[in-house]
Amino acid sequence: MIERAKAALKNAYAPYSNFRVAAAVRTKSGRIYTGVNVENASYGLTICAERVAVFKAVSEGDRDIEAVVVYTDTEEPTPPCGACRQVIAEFNPDALIVMAGRSRTYTAKLSELLPNPFTPTRLPKTPRSEV
């Protein structure tokens, strides 16, 4: 998975921060989905690599996330931001998170990086409206 993320890094679009990030998501089906950060001149519209990869998996109907790799071309690994942690928790609060840099890799469960996440189980049970 790290190699897949490294290969995707060339597609990162980071003209403002010059901080390129790539991610790879593996689901229970065994498929791997990659993503890169995509910046925007309107900074708030920027999206992280992890969310791109998760959304690609979900858009293909593959929601059972097992592991996420975050790769940066830096010496030290970079953890996912809080927003990405929350998005991953939606699909698996115990997903394995692999943070990889050029010289070191660190692995943790998402639950260690985001204890007590807001998940669908926290929502009140209400009947769905008919569409």
Image: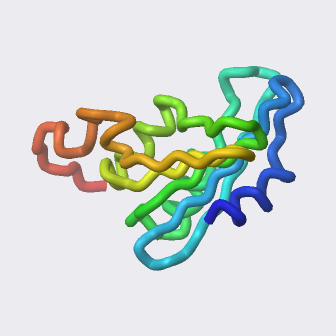
Residue 108, given in percent of the width and then of the height, sits at: 41, 47
The residue drawn where x is 71% and y is 45% is 103
Residue 52, given in percent of the width and then of the height, sits at: 62, 49
Quadrant for residue 7, please give it: bottom right
Task: Find the residue positioned furthest to the front.
Answer: 103
**Quadrant (top left/top right/bottom left/bottom right) for the C terminus:** bottom left
Q: Nearer the viewer, residue 95 or 76?
A: 76
Residue 80, given in percent of the width and then of the height, sits at: 54, 37
The residue drawn where x is 22% and y is 49% is 129
Task: Find the residue positioned furthest to the bottom.
Answer: 29
In the rendered image, the vertical position of residue 16 relative to residue 57, given as above or below: above
The residue drawn where x is 55% and y is 75% is 31
**Quadrant (top left/top right/bottom left/bottom right) for the N terminus:** bottom right
On screen, residue 25 versus residue 65, left or right, reads: right
On screen, residue 85 versus residue 103, left or right, reads: left
The residue drawn where x is 31% and y is 52% is 94
